[in-house]
Amino acid sequence: MKIDLHTHILPRDWPDLDAKYGYGGFVRLDHYKPCCARMMIGDRVFREITDNVWDPKRRIEEMDSAGVSMQVLSTVPVMFSYWARPTDALDLSRLLNDHIAEVVRQNPNRFVGLGTIPLQDVDLAAQELERCVSQLGLRGVEIGTHVDPNEHCHGADCRNLDHRSLDVVWKTAERLNAAIFVHPWDMMGKERMPKYWLPWLVGMPAETCLAICSMMFGGVFERFPKLRVAFAHGGGAFPFTIGRIEHAFYVRPDLLAVDNKTNPRSYLATDKTPARFYVDSLVHDTEALKILVKLFGSHRVALGSD
């Protein structure tokens, strides 16, 4: 089987969320011509998409053409809405998760699903993770690389994935054997690099590297040894900076090894064992893919088409 870990799906339609929740910032779809829609945030076009984003029949046609046996479905990361009120983000998560579960139910031999959870409230997030797996039959969840502070979360600080408040989510995922797919969003440094699509070209790889380092240095993999985690886009910048990261572990342990004394390279593949976590293959470069396989082992590099 050829299983594509990294594919995004949306419903064809959903309610006007700005009107429903009473404040702006949510995504709506503008179906301005056949088989094509604009993802809108207010009056701004976020991205233009075609019907393969919402039509399972079109997706299956493309899968057959590409020789893909099964797709893992997850939402488009801009839909995470970690900045929103927690109850509103939960409501939106349930809408998206119910949709993915229905697509999987209708095509169980071609699709499996990952849900989304409102990480700005870890208790609600853990509850929705439980519902995704136990009630909807999804295989886990897709999450972002961090949780930003926002006006609706009572002054919560910016949380990277090492933040101890997230332990309830990791504990729930480990108990359920639920997969965690980490996808960058809300990229760092976007204020300094608005031109040339640099938030996606530079910020996204850095976001994923930050998430990996946060989980390693914060001891998440040590506290939850059965947690199954995959990172998008080949792990971003991480595979190509592991030498610098390991060097820092030796020369500045006072700054790096404060919460976890484990050498970062020990999480990667050895001659006998694959890496501790997964990455997808989406690096757009043959030589980069060879590096991934060397660092992670072939059993930890999953097909990903995005």
Image (tube, rainbow, N blue to C red):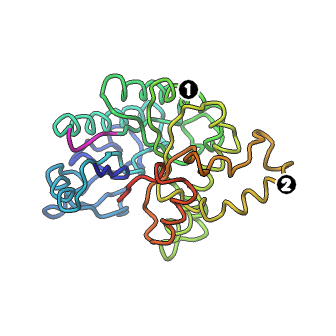
Would you name the residue on which mark 2 appears?
A: 252
Residue 150 on the magenta span = no
User: Which circle marks residue 261 in the picture?
Assistant: none
Task: State whether residue 207 is above or below residue 18.
Answer: below
Cα–Cα gap, marks 2 and 1: 31 Å
Q: Which residues are magenta?
A: 109-113
Residue at 30%, 28% in the rendered image: 136
Q: Mark 2 packing: few (<14 Cα in 10 Å), some, or many (20+)?
A: few
What is the quadrant of residue 108 in the picture? top left
> From the viewer's perspective, is 51 left or right of 3?
left
Residue 57 in the figure: left or right of residue 84: left
Image quarter of residue 304: bottom left
Q: Secondary structure at mark 2?
A: loop
Identify the residue position indicated by label 1 in the image. 171
Q: Earlier in the sequence, mark 2 or mark 1?
A: 1
Asked if residue 111 is among those painted magenta in the image, a careful observer would answer: yes
Q: Are marks 2 and 1 in contact (CB under 8 Å)?
A: no
Indicate the secondary structure of the residue bearing disc 1: helix
Indicate the position of residue 199 as horizontal and vertical percent values. 52, 66
The residue sitting at 21% across, 56% down in the picture is 63
Q: Position of residue 208 (x, y in %)?
A: 56, 55
Q: Residue at x 63, y 44 (%)?
A: 160
Q: Residue furthest bottom?
A: 196
Left/right placement of residue 298 relative to residue 71 reads: right
